[in-house]
Amino acid sequence: MPLFMDIHHHVPGLTAEAVAAAHQQDLAVQDKYGVKFLRYWYDEATGKIFCLSWAPSREAAIAVHREAHGLVADEIVEVKEGS
């Protein structure tokens, strides 16, 4: 299954608690779309969030975010893991 990194460029008022809650919402919905969210990273100062997932398509990853909390990524890039 493809690996995707999605990037949210600026989420206003971002806090550690808010991003953790959004991630839990993603996990609650992901199976419906065949997606597995693996990890996330964030920067409170800039409001940036990065989410790594296995997904059958970009559209499936978008659908999870849309249904879970409405924070759709600004950018989604298919990535390959290096050694």
Image (cartoon, grey):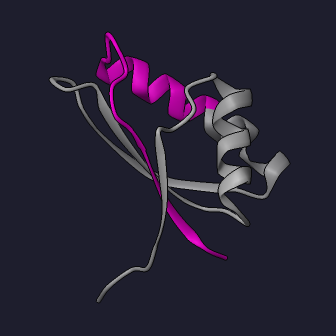
Say left or right for 29 vs 71: right
Please tell me which residue is depicted at 63% across the width and 22% down the height of the picture.
69
- Classify the position of the N terminus by image quarter: bottom right
Location of residue 71 with respect to 2 vertically, above or below: above
Return the residue found at the far left: 45
| Residue 76 painted magenta | no
Residue 3 horizontal side relative to residue 58, left or right: left
Which quadrant of the rendered structure holds the C terminus?
bottom left
Q: Is residue 1 left or right of residue 5?
A: right
Residue at screen point 39% across, 80% down: 81
In which quadrant of the rendered view does residue 26 lie? top right
Q: Is residue 15 magenta?
A: yes
Across and down, in percent, residue 40 comes to 39, 46
- Residue 16 picture quarter: top left
Spot the residue most to the bottom.
Answer: 83
The residue that appears at 70% across and 56% down in the rendered structure is 35
| Residue 73 percent location from the top left of the image | 51, 38
* Residue at image location 31% in from the left, 10% down from the top: 13
In the image, the segment drawn in magenta is: 1-25
Q: Is residue 27 left or right of residue 80?
A: right
Q: Residue pushed farthest top? A: 13
Figure disc tally? 0
Rendering coords of residue 39 (x, y %): 43, 52
Residue that protrudes farthest toward the right in the picture:
32
